[in-house]
Amino acid sequence: MASTSWYWTLILLKASGGYRSQAFPSNQLFFQQQFADLLGCDSLESEVDKRIQRRLMALLTDNSAGLETRLLAEYCLRCYISHQILYACIDLQTKFGQEHGFSRDDVLRIVLNDVDLTRSLLVSVESGYRPFAADIITTFKPQVGSLSAWARMLTRQHNDLNNFLLEHGILQQSNWALLNEKTPDDLQRIFSDTFNLPASEIEQACKLLSGYHAVYRRDRRGRRGKCQPPTETQINEIQRRAALPVSAAAVIEKLVEIADYLRRYQLLSKGVLPSISMDDPAHGSGVEPATSSDDNASDSESDEIIQLLYELVNECLEQAIRTVIDQRYHYLKERASPKAEQYRLALKLYYCEHRTMAEMVPELNLDAQFQVTRLLKVDDFLANIRRQLLRQLKDRFSGLSHRKELFHDYRCADRLQNLDENHLAPLIKKPRANASGNSTSNSFFLQCLCNVIQQL
């Protein structure tokens, strides 16, 4: 529910961090004159809020209303928009900030840039002053929807904000929008080339996506706005069209799983490695870990598998590390950002010289420790190395024709997950330092990591 004061108070960033609300008495007086029936009201119902917005937009665009009236209508709308931008940013920080390493102020600084109400948007082209609020006002159509919904949607779609979120491994696109924009041919190529999934699984996913498109695109034709989850009726029709022997509940689960793969692909294609680990059970295939096909396999055969696994890890680990570092470095470099070189130096200081993040701040020419945390993204970095190593191991297993009987199971997704959890996760862990600043664990992994870093 909106507040009447949103129309005469502007949200501004403070130099010391955070934000403040600045009231404009002239806006308040104008608002009370235009909407005398709302005197004494602190909150506004949705329909009343829309009526106010329609009236203010009508005054703003009415050349016969007089310049002062038009300006005051504009100022009221800009104040209101600043509150919507604030709440959109708070929502993003609440959902993703802690997990992905950014604060509310980080995102506010990108989009909350309307700092001077005395400079009208009506003359913004001549003055060069063009805050984000100008884009919101000039594209808003009050006959279509509310200003709150429009302002928050454009905030979430802001290019610089989305680039920032991508840098932190976040792709703001619903599952249903992702599914809606990819063709079955796209899906076949992505699943085969990027994720190397079995042919049977790819075929089933393509059939399901074709059924989804036939139903969802048909029903959505001519509509705008966010792609909503399919209804129960739509799910049942998708199931019939796909002709797959699964329940309606399984259809929705499989669609979400396909969308998750597409989200990871989108991030990879933009040079950002997804921060969700492959072995996260919330995003896995739901397959129970398989038991050995031969429960009576000899201990010597098991020992041989383990020995060969560690030999392969030893061969593949440095390349996996190098790939992850290069992808992150080139992504930062393409943005013409000094962070690219800072990133390489930060890796050396943290992993090879065992500096604390607080000690690294001045050497990296940064202002605060949280910036080092965000630059290194240690948990994401290690998860991405594990993921890249798994991908390389899977390729190597396929090439071991002379050991096909040993490694057949390890080419399956569930056994790879088991391998990741039981062998790679204990190996690739966040380094800990003792009181003298020397690493006390993961010596093999850290040695490989430092070998790569020193060669950069």
Image: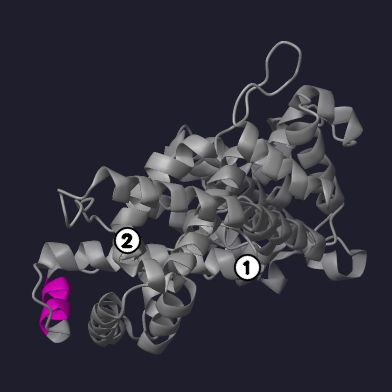
Determine if the magenta segment contains residue 236.
yes
Q: Nearer the viewer, mark 1 or mark 2?
A: 2
Nearer the observer, 426 or 327: 426
- The residue beneath circle 1 is 270
| Of pointers 1 and 2, the one earlier in the residue sequence | 1
Disc 1/disc 2 C-alpha distance (Å): 37 Å
Q: Residue furthest top?
A: 435
Judged by its main secondary structure, the magenta piece is: helix
Residue 435 lies left or right of residue 246; in this view the side is right
> Which stretch did the figure color magenta?
233-240
Residue 103 in sight here:
no
> Is 117 drawn above or below residue 374 in the view shown?
below
- The residue beneath circle 2 is 406
Residue 416 lies left or right of residue 128; in this view the side is left
Residue 128 lies left or right of residue 98; in this view the side is right
Of helix, strand and loop, which one carries label 2? helix
> Is 416 drawn above or below residue 41 in the view shown?
below
The kind of residue tagged 2 is Leu
Of helix, strand and loop, which one carries label 1? loop
